[in-house]
Image (spheres, grey):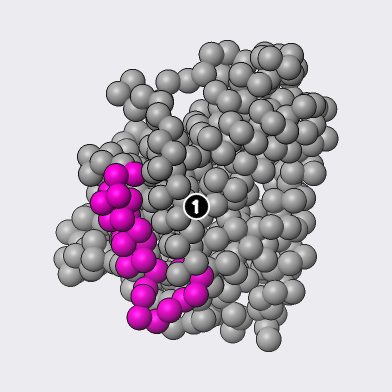
Amino acid sequence: MLDAALTLLILLAMVVLFATQALPLSVTALSGALILCFAGILGYADLYASLANPTLLLFAGMFVVGAALFHTGLAQWIGDTAIKRLGQSETRLLWVTMLMSSILSTFASNTGTTAALIPVVLSVCLAAHIPASRQLMPLAFASGFGGFSTLIGTPPNIIVADILKQEGYTTFGFFEFAWVGLPLAFAGMLYLTWASKALLPQQQAQSAPVLDENSPPAVRRPKHMVICGVILLAVVVVMALNIPALPIEIVALVGALLCVLTGCLTDKQAYQSIEWDTLFLFAGMFVVAKALQTSGAADFLAHIFQKGLGQGAPTWLLVSACYFFTVFLNSFISNTACAALLSPIVMTVAKGINAQPQPLLMAVAVGASCSFLTPIGTPPNTLVWKVGGYRFTDYARLGGGLVFVCWLVAVIIIPWRWPAYP
């Protein structure tokens, strides 16, 4: 019981640091992991094991492949061509913007996708005399829709799939997230088509943000754009085939190496494209998740959760509880940390009520992608905050209804596709 109490105390301190961002997220995660080892709750071998987790290779490889889209100019060309050719009206421009954001963020960083499309949207809005403020927030939100449709689209998807695999359950397939992701994207876009005009301020945007004074805009290289597109397509197809001899993390690593060997980006650009903060955050939280389980802390939290819901709670209620708690927590800490914190607890809850964990973990993954309530929920939200001239409360005005729409989709589809009690 002492180990459980100490683990929860360390976890509480980490949540506060995550929320306040007093320290970098990865530093907080690794510090918590080290303290758990110092306290004897876990051994140092557990820390070493977290750094050898194959999922880290999957993260790193896809960061590089996604970055190649931007360094070759392919992402910018896709967005520029689509928006300028089809964006003839405010509504049509909005749909094209959201579709491009969703499609690109399915396989590339949602931060990079948003950053690449912001100047394109601004230039079209200026030429067409369309309020950019009603385009940019939907652009940021739509990047979350795309990320949720595949296993590699966003880190929380990989995290929930990984814990299922570790615990010996049938894990989620590469495109299995699309059962929820595609309807969620369509419903979300329909909502944003109406709500962006009704709820967002009507004003022209400020100048585009500078992300990195040293990451000049990519020069389009037609040859390498084609090569990059072929590599990305090959990686996605092979991953989707789920070939036992080719684990998806190896496929991602091969794709990353091919991007460098073919000149789609340099080795230096490849290293810079890897979000090391995410990798070390995942490694640190992997240790914390194990401590939650071995110390009995997850059992304690799960008991409280189960007591509130009661035995035999219907799947829709379990999904709703997991979804809304994740959304709430995700308003203050990163979606990766949020998924890593809640996954072991939700897994323990599922075991405690003799339910299948897939619907509960899918609800956590969906909730972790619904960061719509604050400008600090995700990097894309932050990117459009100042350039769109938004107030803090504008996110809650537009995002609150979107959170409800996403819940409605999730609570209908998840219990049907993954029943808790087969």
**Residue 71 in the image: above or below residue 322:** above
What is the quadrant of residue 417 in the picture?
bottom right
Quadrant in which the N terminus appears:
bottom left
Kindly tell me whether residue 266 is visible in this rendering: yes
Residue 203 on image: x %, y %: 71, 14
**Along the horizontal axis of the image, is 241 left or right of 214?**
right
User: Could you say which is closer to the camera, residue 370 or residue 140?
Assistant: 140
SS class of the residue under badge 1? helix
Q: Amino acid at mark 1?
A: Phe
**Along the horizontal axis of the image, is 190 left or right of 57?**
right
Residue in the image at 26% along x and 51% along y: 261
Residue 25 on image: x %, y %: 35, 43
Give the magenta-colored segment's residue range.
Answer: 239-264
**Residue 239 in the image: above or below residue 67:** below
What residue is disc 1 on? 107
* Residue at the far bottom in the pictured view: 422
Residue 343 on image: x %, y %: 48, 64
Q: Is residue 259 magenta?
A: yes
What is the quadrant of residue 318 in the picture?
bottom right
Kindly tell me whether residue 279 is visible in this rendering: no
Residue 331 on image: x %, y %: 55, 41
